[in-house]
Structure formats: C-alpha cells, structure tokens
Amino acid sequence: MTFGGFRGVTVQAKDEFKLWQGMLIAGFIVGGIVYALIFWSSVMYRRRHADYIPHQFHSNKPIEIIYTTLPILIIVGIFYFTVVTENEVDAVSSTPSEIVHVVAYRWGWQFSYDSGYNVSQGVLIKTAAEPKLLALPFASNEYPRLLLPQGETVRIVLTSADTIHGFYVPEFNFSRYAQPGVTNEFDFTPTTIGTYSGQCTQYCGLYHSEMRFSVQVVTPAKFQQWLTTTQTSQAQGAA
Amino acid sequence: MTLLTDRPKVSDDDHGAGGHDGEHHGPVGIMKWLTSTDHKVIGMSYTITSFVMFLIAGLFAIMIRVQLTGPDSTIVSQHTYNELFTMHGSLMIYLFIGPFAFGGLANYIVPLQVGAPDMAFPRLNAFSYWLYLTGSLIMIGGFLTVGGSADFGWVAYAPLSDAVNSPGAGPDMWIVALMLTGFSAIFTGVNLVTTIFYLRAPGMTMFRVPIFTWNMLVTGILILIAFPVLFGALVMLWCDRHLGTHIFSVVGGGVPVLWQNLFWFWGHPEVYIIALPFFGVVTEVLPVFSRKPLFGYRGMIFATISIAALSTAVWAHHMFTTGTVLLPFFSLMSYFIAVPTGIKFFNWIGTMWRGSVILNTPMLFSIGFLLLFLGGGVTGIFLASPPIDFATHDTYFVVAHFHQVIFALVFGAFSAIYYWHPKFFGRMLRDGLGKISFWLMIVGSFVMLTPMYLVGLRGMPRRIAEYAATDGWTFENRLVTIGSLMIFVGVAVTLVNLVVSWRKPVFCGANPWDANSLEWATSSPPPHHNFDSIPPIRSERPVWDANHPDFTTHDHGLSPAEPAEVSV
Amino acid sequence: MKFEANFLIFLGIFGAITALVYGILSDELAGTVMLAGFALLGLFPGGYYLWWHRRIGTRAEDDPNAELVDGAGVVGVFPSSSIWPFIFGVGCALVAISLVFGFWTALPGFFMVISAAFGIVSESRHGGLSRH
C-alpha cells in the first residue's frame, strides 16, 4: 500500500517512504477509531422521546488519564522513527562521486557539475509584453536536465540568485529551499534508471508555474561518457 | 443609554427579560451604526462585514478552481492568477475567519455569557471595528491600482515581497491594511481578556465560565502574544521597500529567512487564534443538543491552555525545507500539540456518549466540524515529520491539509450562525434548508479534499497557475472543482435561508434550544443593557440549572481548587 | 484573581523554559528573543495580578457561593454611543494610507486623530455622555 505516495527511486526516498507507510498505518488506525466513535455517538444516541434527559455524567478519571497518556506514548514512538529517518535522509556523505551546484533563479535552473559541465535553462522574458507561456511536459528540451548516475551518491549544493525557490523532485520524495545567501547541501543516491519530473515549489513570481526541470538517472558508465562528451563540447563551444 | 450600570436582580424565573428597553433613545439608522459602542451592534457589524469578505474570497476560490479544472488553462493570465490566490488567502485569513470569530461572535456572546452589560472598553471596541473596516477596504483597494493588488501570496515571503520583485502600490496597500487590522485584533484581545477577568457576574468563578468564553480568553492572550510580532515584521518589510534598509535582503547583509521566522511566530499562533473560537462554538453546541453537560470541563481548559502555550513553540514547522531550522525541536513540539487536541476530541465524544442527541442543523455542522478537523489534524501529524514534509511541502497535500482544518472551522462558523441566529434576531433559521446546506457542504468538502491530497502526493505544487496535460493531474483537479462547486451551492443555500427567515419569520423566545449558558437567560434579541435579571450561578450551566433543578451538576460550592467529582 | 494570576505566570514560565531550551539547542536569535518576549508577557501581568490579589482578596466573581446581590452596585463605566471611535479609526486609516499615497492624506488624518483624542478625553471627563 503506497497510500498515494511514491515508493521512491533513491535510497533516501525509500527511507522516507517506509516512514510514510508507518505513519499512514498509524494514522488510519487512530483516525479510524476516533471516526468510529464520532459516528457511533452521533447516531446511536439519537433522541427517542422528546422529554428524555439522560444521566448527567461529565467526568471519568480513568478514561481521561488513558486518553491523555496514550497519545503521549504514541508520539514518543513516532518521534523516534521520525528522527531516525530524518538522519538518513539528511545524511551527507564525505565522498560523493560528483558534486552539482544548483542555482535557482527567476524562472529557471542552473546545474553546474564540478567535473566541468554546466547548463542553465529557464523562462527568460525578453520583451515587456507578457507572452502566453504554458508549461510543457517535464522531459521537454526547453527545461534543464539533471543527469545522475545510478547507485552512486551525488552531492547537490543549492542556492538561489534572487528570491526563494523550491527544488522539488517528487519521485525522490524530497524538496529543499533554494535561498539567496544560504547554501543547502544534500545527497541523492539514485537506485532506478528513468527520467523524473522536477519543479519549483516555492512561489517566486510570475512564471513560477513554468519553472520546471527533469532528472535523468543513467548507468554510471553512461554518466561518465555524457560528462566527458558535454564537457568537451562546452569547452569547444567556449573556445 | 445606560452608563453606570447596576447589577441586575436575582431571578427565579427561567424566562429572560422583557424585550423592551424603554429608556434607550439613542441615535438611529446610519448614525447608530457609526456611533454605537454596544458590543452587540459592533459584533453584528464584524459578523456581517467578515461574512462579506468570506463571500468575496470564495468567489476568488471559484475562479481559481475554474482555471485549474483543465490543463493548459489560459482563462486568466499568470499575473491575475497570482493576485487571485494571494487575495483569496489574505481575505480569508486576515479579513474573514479571525474577525468573524473574535470580532463578531466573541464581541456579541462573551459579555452575555459572563453576565456583563458590555465589553470592558466599549469605545475601544468600536475603534477596533473601524480599523478593521478601513483596513479591509484598503486591502481590497489594491485591485484598483495600476499594478493590481498584492500578488506575493498571503505570506509575502522576502525577497519576493521586496521593492524589486513586487513593486507598486498594491503590495504597499496590503501591508498598510494589515497594520490597521492587526491593531484591530490587538485591541479586541485587550477587551476580551479584561472583560473575562473583570466583568464576570458574582458566583461565576473561572471554572464556571462557559468554554466558548474560556477559549476566547485564551484567544485574546494569543492575539496579544502574536500580533505585535506581525506588526513588527510588516514595519520591517515596509522599511526595506521604502527606506533603503536591508533587513531581509542579502545585499547589505540582511537575512531573507528572518521574514519567515517573524511571520510564522505570528502565523502559527494565528491558526490557533482562528481555531480556538470555533472549538468553543462546538463545545457550546454539543452539550446543548446532547442534553448532557460537557464531558471533562477541566480537561478542556487544561487542553486549551496547553494548545496555546505549545502553539508559540512550533512556528518553524512551516520552514522545515529551509535547511536552517532545528528540525527535531519543532517536530516534537508539533507532535505534542496533538495530545491536547486529542483530549478535546475525546471530551466532545464523551459529551455525546449516552446523551440524547438531536441532529438539527447547528448540531450537524458541529459534528461536521469534528469529521473534518480529525482528518485534517491527522494529516497535520504527517506534516510534522520533517522527512514527510520534505516530500510534501508546498504541494497540494499541504493545501488539502490546511483547507480541511479550515473548512472544519467554517463548519464551526455555520454552526454558530444557526445556533445563535435566534438569539441575535429573535427568529429561527429554517432547519430543512439548513440540513440541505450542511449535506452539500460536507459532501462537497470530502469530494474536494480527497483528490487534492492525492494529486499533491503525486507531485502537483501549490500556487501554480496552470499545468500540462501530460502531468496526469487533470482528473483529480476536475473532482476538486466539482467539490468546490458543491460547497459554493451549499453556502448559497444558507444565504437563501437567511433571506427566507427574514422575510417569513418564525419568532422565538429567550431559549428556543433549552440551552445552558447565560445568553439564553435574556430575551431574543437581548435588551440594550443585556440583562434585567440573572439566574444564580452555581455551575457552567446556570440557565440549565434554573430550568432543570433535578438534573444539575453543581460542584456544591466547593472552591475551584478542589476537584468537583460529582455526578447526579 | 489568584487563578488568573497563576494562569499567566504558568504561560510565562512555559515561555521562559522554552526560550532557554530553544536558545541553547538552536543558537538562533530571533526565535529565542520572541519566546523570551512571550515569557515576559506572561510574567509581568501575572506577577501584577498576584500582588493585586494579595491586596484585594476574593472578589464576588471568584466566590463560588456568591449571591448576585454581592455584586450589586456600580459595575463600571460603559460609555454610550460616541462618534469619536469612528473619527479616530478613519483618521488612523488616512494616516496609514499616506504611507502609500503620500503625505496629503496624513494631514486630514492627523486632524481627525487629534480631534478624536480630545473628544474621547472630554467625553470621559463628562462621564462618557455624548451630547444629543
């Protein structure tokens, strides 16, 4: 049962998904019990006689103690699992295989690989008139693509050039703010080949809706080949 | 026009005072509205004005939903859409739900429930209303400027809200409006706390105060804690925009995330400021229509105080994805707030348990509150976990969560309208139309919210003006729109109900519901000075005790420090 | 007044402990200062009420056995209808809007605010009566 969430295509995403499943199960159990109690008490005690006044009880110490302490215990439990998962998701390796600097701006993304390749694509308004701009499919060539090697850990170093943006990859079960003057660092260890959507989640103005990117996970060999090729062609282009 | 008021006489009768206020011959018509310091007139002004804001913001919501029903939507431009969601959120939160609760309901009901002739500071009360009205008009006036209204979201994050990224008069009018309405709230908070501390009738100890009034006391204190922080943040933002300061901009050594810290230190208590009054409404309605006293009165008070205290310590759970906040601290404190909220739920259920429940309109809306707030509260627990928040922050999952809890509060507001309308106007609202309104709204709410959660989990971000057909979000969005239209029709049915009940009135007396608290001891509507007589106060249900002497739950005069473990 | 005092002091102590814990754990200044402010907002009035309670003792509304007649007499001064809150409110709005549209609205605004201040004070001196 995914309960609507993504199973995740990175190691960190799968950790988050386990927590998600656990929380949902707990939520359905607790919520289900309370929903049942609400329905029961609304329906089963409906007035039969117009003048009936029921026994006027208003307190029951044992029950009150139970429903105060039991939630506290449940919370201590879920807090423990939350902290464990949070440490897994936020852990940064000391030896990532690649470092990518991501700079968010209004309204696009710049990906700069430490190995030398960088791309910057987004919505650039050249005229004063507001063009009728629509969002395209995520994998479109109009949007920058972040290539990652399967099974290896890549460090993302994230910042913003102007306002706050949100770097969000749904199937990585992860997002982080890109903020001016702040550098956020986190790791991805992708597990599954594929192309995944990415979008800005923190409202940043006029073309926030169109600030998309994609993430493509390829085999490590293909990744190295791509790095070399693009690095060379960029160097040639610059020359 | 009474000014030095004597206490009303003791009365053994169960009927309220006569409906005349023969000696009152103050101004009438428009001058009455402009000069009245009567908490009932001011409360009604707030209620009507805020409800108009609700309807306007609701129209913005419908426009948003129409835009998002299908992909590649160009019904409105991005700029217009950004104004729409900014003003929808701003009107709903700043101008409707708070003022309706503490300006409208509390102003009218609290003095009546404590047996007072008015609020502690009547002219300050009136002044608060005029600040609120002028502030509201200024905020809406932003639409008339060249650049349009504010369009940076109701939270106005820096640096988006600075002069470079959001130039123009519209944003400035938004800031100025909030400075005015913020002080309106602060002065109302002062009035509430003072009235409840100082103007209670003899015998009404703090542990015999009705829970609606107790909640308004705690709301008043939260207002005093939180709103000055918002005002400070707004002043800072204005200075950055106009005086060349660099408080929130990196250029010049400022810190953009400081805006978020300040805003949410206000923002989280704010959601409890808007929630506690409606918790209070539900806590009034459930005992009356279960014919039993509130279960766990003291636990309720302990829970309310805990919620208020904890609410000041959770603000950065809105900032988990900034990477700059202490995650475990805010996560744990946010989880802890679930405990007192759970206590309240069990007390509400315990009130109905083995009672004699009648499912009329006010009761249905209060039960609807329970159904919605429970689900929204549980999804809130999920969001309090940082890893889950990383996956869902700023997606429609969050939008669904807060709309679910806020719809619960709106159901509380409708419950209050149906419950207290007879007291305000001396005439009943039609129960049949009320039930139709309820069912449309509750079904519409779940039809709207469920797909919203799901599409958020599948990656749809919030505050986007349009999306592509290949995103796979279209089906859920269509359902969300259908749900929102059902709610719209449900609200319209209540409006029709208000008109019909005015045109063809069914008059009522002082206590049509056989209710418990002091407002039902006086006529409907109450006279100018509120009470001609007050029954003895020996429990939190003085009117019930007077009407049903064989079914009281007196604490037999024990002092409040001793436990009152008595059953009849 | 004792319960009210203890309630506010409890909030103040909660705020103080939270500010301390948060300040040490997070090393973040803004939140710590705001929590400390919250603590003072509970401790100051709460302390005042506690001192006041020791002077005044039990009031009629704190006495669970009080009869209504115990509270007989003047409850307070409740000023009747008055135009000044309206004038004051509109004046404040005009002063506020001058931040957006320029000083010219601040002039009538200040005039109204000052008139209202005089009006309210003079009303209070006459026991809250407005003249019709």
Image (spheres, coloured by chain):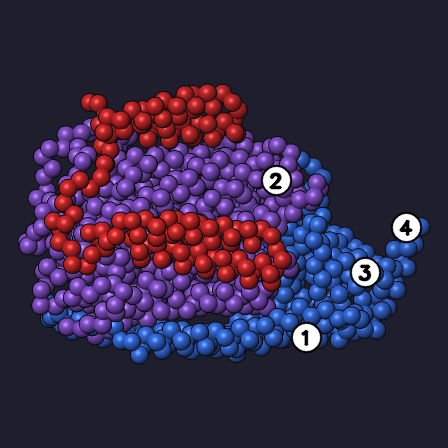
Query: What is the CA distance from the residue labelled 1 to the residue labelled 4?
Result: 37 Å
Residue farthest along the left direction in this orientation: B13
Disc assigned to residue B162: 2
Q: Residue at x 50, y 75 (%)?
A: A76
Residue A234 is situated, as x and y percent measured from the top left of the image, at: 88, 55
Which color is chain A depicted in?
blue
Q: Give me the chain letter of mark 3.
A: A
Q: Give me the chain letter of mark 4.
A: A
Which color is chain B depicted in?
purple
Question: Picture quarter containing residue B387?
Answer: bottom right
Which quarter shows the N terminus of chain B? top left
Residue type, mark 3 in image: Tyr
Residue A208 visible in the displayed image: no
Circles 3 and 4 on the same chain: yes
Query: What is the CA distance from the residue labelled 1 to the residue labelled 2?
Result: 39 Å
Disc 1: which residue = A11
N-term mark: 1 or 4: 1
Q: Please say if the residues under marks 1 and 3 sit with CB atoms less than 8 Å apart.
A: no
Is residue B536 toward the left or the right of residue B453 in the image?
A: left
Query: What is the CA distance from the residue labelled 3 to the residue labelled 4?
Result: 16 Å
Q: Which chain is red?
A: C
Q: Give me the chain letter of mark 1.
A: A
Disc 3: which residue = A113
